[in-house]
Image (cartoon, grey):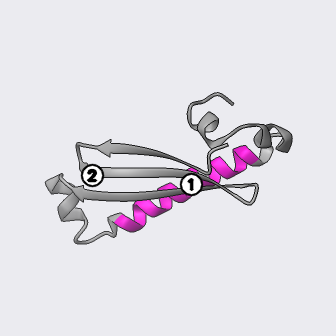
Amino acid sequence: MSDQTELTMTYSGIYSGTGKWTISDINGQTRVTYEINLRIESTLIRLLSSVLSVASIHSRLMEKVLSGLAQYLGQMDKRTLYRHSPDDILKNRV
């Protein structure tokens, strides 16, 4: 089992930049982290960001994504989770 698997995505459109998912095995537990580095390319969103916290909105959306992932994984049989490596999870082999 690999200790860490990374998946990097490139964004373009309203935003441009990269996002990186990291799935790590830490003492038999799976840890998922997400790092994002984006620039706002849309003039409208850039103007809105002077009034609204775009970062806070994005953070709330990501919390929902990660919460859903945690809920999904919590519903799986723990024996199933321990059989699969982070590589398998990323490649949809679970």
Residue underneath mark 2: 17
Distance, label 2 to label 1, CA atoms, is 21 Å
Bounds of the magenta span? 55-73
**Label 1 secondary element:** helix
Which residue does the image show at 52% across and 52% down from the upper left?
22
Query: In the picture, residue 27 is in which quadrant?
Result: bottom right
Query: Is 50 situated above or below 37?
Result: below
- Label 1 sits on what residue type? Lys
Q: Residue 73: x and y, percent?
A: 72, 45
| Numbered badge on residue 78 | none
**Mark in the foreground, 2 or 1:** 2
**Label 2 secondary element:** strand
Earlier-in-chain disc, 2 versus 1? 2
Which residue does the image show at 63% across and 55% down from the upper left?
67
Q: Residue 49: x and y, percent?
A: 25, 66
Q: Residue 86: x and y, percent?
A: 63, 43
Query: Is 65 situated above or below 27?
Result: above
Which residue does the image show at 31% across and 69% down from the upper left?
52
Secondary structure of the magenta portion, mostly?
A: helix
Q: Quadrant of the N terminus?
A: top right
Query: In the picture, residue 79 is in which quadrant?
Result: top right
Residue that sits furthest to the left in the current view: 43
Could you classify mark 1 by the number of other residues whose Cα lies within 10 Å: few (under 14), some (14-19), or many (20 or more)? Answer: few
- Label 2 sits on what residue type? Gly
Is 67 inside the magenta-drawn segment?
yes
Residue underneath mark 1: 64
Q: Quadrant of the C terminus?
A: top right
Q: Residue 55: x and y, percent?
A: 36, 66
Residue that sits furthest to the top in the current view: 93
Which residue does the image show at 64% across and 47% down from the upper left?
69
